[in-house]
Amino acid sequence: MPGRVTGAPLRVHAFAAALLWLATGCQHVPSNRYGVQRLRLEGVEAMDPAALRACLATRERPAFGINLGSSSVPSCGVPPFDSGRLHLRLWRWPWTTWPTYDRAVFERDLQRIERWYRARGYYDARVVSAEFDPPVASNNDRTTGADGQPVCERGADDEGCRLRLSVSVEEGRPVTLARLRVVGDQSLAPRLRRRLRDAIELEEGARFDEALHDRSKRGILTTLHEDGFACASVHGRVTVTPRAHSAQVLYTLDAGPRARIGSIRVEGNEELPERAIRGAAYLRSGDRYHESALQDAQRAIFALGGLSSVEVVGRARRRQGAEDSDDPSACTGLVDVTIRVAPGRRTRIGLGAGIQSGVLEAQATQGETLNVAQWDLHLLAFYEHRNLLGGMRRLRIEDRPKLVFPAQFPGVRAADGDRGPRPGNTLSFEFRQPAFLEARTTLSFTTSWDLGPDPSFGFFRHDFDGRVGVRRRFLRDRLEVYGGVHGNVFRVPGGSDLASGGLRGNRSDYYLSFLEQFVALDLRDNPGRPRRGIYLSLGLQEAGFFMPSAWDYIRVLPEARGYIPLPLGMVLAGRFSVGALFIRHADAGLDAKSFALGPVRYRLRGGGPTSHRGFVAGFLGDSGAPAGPGESFDSEDGGLRRWLASVELRAPVTQDFGLVLFSDLGDVTQSKRFRFRHLNTAVGLGIRYQTPVGPLRFDVGWLVPGAGAVGGARPAQGKLVSLGFVRFPGAVHLTIGEAF
């Protein structure tokens, strides 16, 4: 009874505090001014009203809504202008500010509307009328008359009035492009001429647009620069016949001589070694000039680390006395390159705290992130030097004391309820040497010691891991290649059966050495938020054989991803991957599961937010053949064969908010054959919210009854999940970053 008496006032106080916060946070219309509550554009049908609004100075009070068809926020004068966006306004937050009405600004906006339409090819467009509610605002943008009395209905004595504006537009008939010609390209190679045509965004028979005309000129010039014509010029002439509603466009090119790189100068490097910067730039005097080579050099130099900014610019050298001339004939055929850098902090020391959920980062080199049902609260202390002994060498030492929770975030205890949070610590050391052997090859050495619960089984262990390898990027960072040597030592302290019921015979000490290679080809338009393109990767491990190791095995992990843009801003994304672990030999002293399935860290597993979302991390698949009498394997023990397939329909709702419909299929087995009849089909719905570090993702995956297997195969058994009053087989995932 006392608990109820003291609890009620707490709830009252919390409710009163919330009301007080809302009251103090509400925005009011400024005194003696009109606040623009709504600006309606009527008659805007062929164009996107949001694209027109972006060019107006008069704005309505912002409201939360949903954009059906596009997630981008239009910018003034930037295509597309006819995206087919459907905006559903839902509500206005009370704390959003009120934009005020200015009569002179609004009159100029009416002129801007007509000029904007002319730029879009609508030369007959005009503003038919402008309506005001209240009507008195059409004559004065102040809410008081000459006698000082209000002329409109105020919400309160100390605030102004709300105004609703409506502008009617008559679009008329657009001007279409009747003829498009390019002259001056006759001497160029046929392949380059085709690329120049592809750079032109205007099309005969389509609506003429000034913005597309300007972008086409820039595209032609960029294409010529990329092919080595650094002094090229492009002139465009547009002839419009308003009565015929037609236009003709003529592009005149003067390519000039094909250029080569002249002098190369480094500026602003101070104490940083110029040799390392020049080496990363990979530019040589006398090489043929390409615009993309400068961009590639800029990315490579910045990747060295230790720099706050990098700028690589080229300036065409012209004949003496004609330095300021734009005539391509004045070009000498040489481009002088300047590399401007600004050093960043050489030494960094940091202290902090954080949360890490469900990722085993050691798998990144193999092109795979291993999901684990584990998260931790940790402290962080690190020391970093970005120019150790000169040469842009990087040294980082990091320590993470942590409290590990053996469950999916934000759970506290393991699924079986036997294991709760446990203390742990991770100490890591990283050394990176750029320009190793050649300018753009990086040597890296990393080692770590992890003391704490095993992420898959929960027992306490020491995990020592070390790697030395070289990495090189090609094709403007599209192709990444890595090769190295990896070692791993696994030790379980004697007498530390912290979860004896959870060991299940998986606690063998072991040592492991293997060669590893990774290659990835990234042809996506934007690796962070891809809309089109493909991504291909292949990871390999070769353990033992001639190196000290408890196993001799080969591990193969190929993966393919594809992205197709769809109307209304949607994207269809797909992924297919397989994995195989071929064990040729294992030490006889290993426990039965380690003997049959390999090292705990490198067994194949499935399930989790970046794998199969119908299962929690590590629980996809079911047992294969038992290791021997009395032995049985579980899905969380891992396996030898795995396949995964996913398809997603990504639909934007607002610029930062989106929905995803997905389906995941796959299987993990301890047998030595793939089981493609074990589909384990899951469908689900996901919510995405964009943050500076990637999309915050919430996915609900449901295992479809009757779609788990074909041909008499037995589907894997998922866990039951509760969402309110609903219980279903599947999984719920909360994480940051796309699934693929």
Image (cartoon, rainbow, N blue to C red):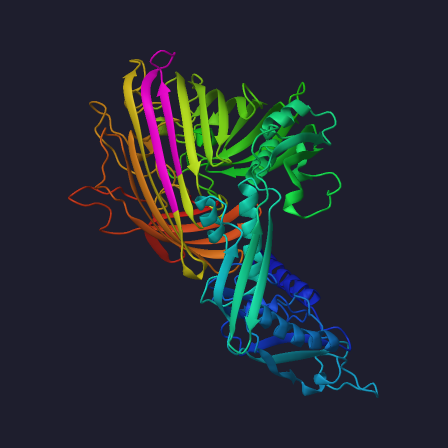
Magenta segment's dominant SS is strand
Residue sitting nearer the eye, 311 or 105: 311
Does the magenta segment cover residue 541? yes
Q: Residue furthest right?
A: 147
Q: Quick one: which residue is furthest to the bottom in this view?
A: 147
Vertical placement of residue 492 versus 683, above or below: above
Left or right side of 591 for 218: right
User: x, y (%) of residue 219?
Assistant: 54, 51
Q: Is residue 164 left or right of residue 653?
A: right
* Quarter occupied by residue 659: bottom left
In this rendering, position of residue 480 left or right of residue 317: left
* Residue 96: percent from left, percent from top: 65, 66
Q: Residue at x 67, y 18 (%)?
A: 389
**Residue 605 screen position, x and y as percent:** 34, 34
- Residue closest to the eye, 62 or 639: 62
Q: Position of residue 413 (x, y in %)?
A: 44, 38
Count how many numbered circles sit on residues in the image: 0
Observer able to see residue 92: no
| Quadrant showing the N terminus | bottom right
Residue 50 visible: yes
Instruction: Indicate yes or no whether the magenta region holds residue 655.
Output: no
Q: Identify the image quadrant of the C terminus.
A: top left
Nearest the camera: 690 or 336? 336
Q: Which residues are magenta?
A: 536-562
Residue located farthest toward the left when viewing the structure as drawn = 712
Q: Is residue 524 left or right of residue 717?
A: right
Above or below, comparing residue 709 to residue 94 in the picture: above
What residue sits 77% from the left and 85% below the top?
Answer: 150
436 shown above or below 711 = above
Q: Residue at x 65, y 83 (%)?
A: 132
The residue sitting at 41% across, 23% down in the picture is 516
